[in-house]
Image (cartoon, rainbow, N blue to C red):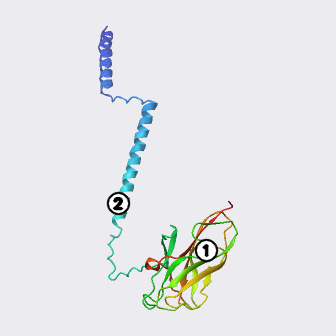
Amino acid sequence: MRKLNKMKWIIPGLLSLSLALAACAPSLPPTPSEAEIAQQVAATQQSKATQNSVETLVALVTEMSKQPTWTPQPACPVCPTQVVVVPTAQTTADPTDGATQPTAAAPTEEAGAKCFQFDFLGDVNYPPGTVMKPGTKFSKTWTVKNTGTCTWTRDYDLVLAGGEAFGTNKRGDIPKDVLPGETIDLTIYDMVAPMTEGTYYSYWMIMAPDGARIGYGPGQQWGLGIQLIVSNE
């Protein structure tokens, strides 16, 4: 009976001790799910990427701080003078036919402001607007007056200043000496109308032996003109 009574007290004591030990033991964390594991991995990768970006930016700023500072360059102490090239021929309007005209440079003072100049007196043949069939041969003649103080010699020429050459070598002769105040007919021979229909323009000026070229009109800018309409009609 005594042993039985002792067992009654021992068994409850062991049970109480077991419960107390169980309460004091640390609890195990719950096992995470696959979704939670994936979230943790993604967060870790994002953290590493952010850290790498910060490290790269710091390295770039450090490298840029080592670069030399740019210093503005001073302006040149003596800048070269701009050179303006004046063309020997330009374009302007010719009131005689409404077409675009080439213009010549004004005569140099060495040649004399009034030494080399002329006036246009009229078209001897083929006035502006003449209609001609393709391939037609013709010669164009103008009447001019030497209004300068210098004599034109045979060394002077008519030269193409712009437009259609009409099959020529772009040059015509002054047939004789032309004294100041004298009138003369100037002709370009052996011209040929183009084979393609259309309106064609050609402008000619007088050239001195030294290469100076002049026209007539204001500033001696207009060339002796041809306006030819090529048509099969």
- Left or right of residue 168: residue 145: left
Name the disc covering residue 186, or none.
none
Tell me the crowding category of disc 1: few under 14, some 14 to 19, or many 20 or more residues within 10 angstroms, Cα based.
Answer: few
Q: Tell me the CA gap for discs 1 and 2.
A: 84 Å
Instruction: Look at mark 1 in the image and give the residue it sits on.
Output: 125
* Total numbered badges shown on the rendered structure: 2
Instruction: Look at mark 2 in the image and give the residue it sits on.
Output: 61
Q: Which residue is at 30% across, 10% downward?
A: 5
Foreground: disc 1 or disc 2: 1
Q: Which residue type carries mark 1?
A: Asn
Give the percent coordinates (x, y) of residue 154.
59, 91
Tell me the crowding category of disc 2: few under 14, some 14 to 19, or many 20 or more residues within 10 angstroms, Cα based.
Answer: few
Give the percent coordinates (x, y) of residue 85.
45, 79
Kindly indicate the quadrant of the structure image that contains residue 153.
bottom right
Query: 96 or 62: which is nearer to us?
Result: 96
Figure quadrant of the C terminus: bottom right
Query: 103 or 73: which is nearer to us?
Result: 103
- Left or right of residue 108: residue 18: left
Q: Which residue is at 31% across, 16% downward?
A: 10
Give the percent coordinates (x, y) of residue 211.
53, 87
Instruction: Check disc 2 and report its element: helix, strand or loop.
Output: helix
Give the percent coordinates (x, y) of residue 54.
36, 52
Instruction: Check disc 1 and report its element: helix, strand or loop.
Output: loop
- Left or right of residue 48: residue 163: right
Q: Which residue type carries mark 2?
A: Val
The image shows residue 229, relative to residue 26, as above or below, that is: below
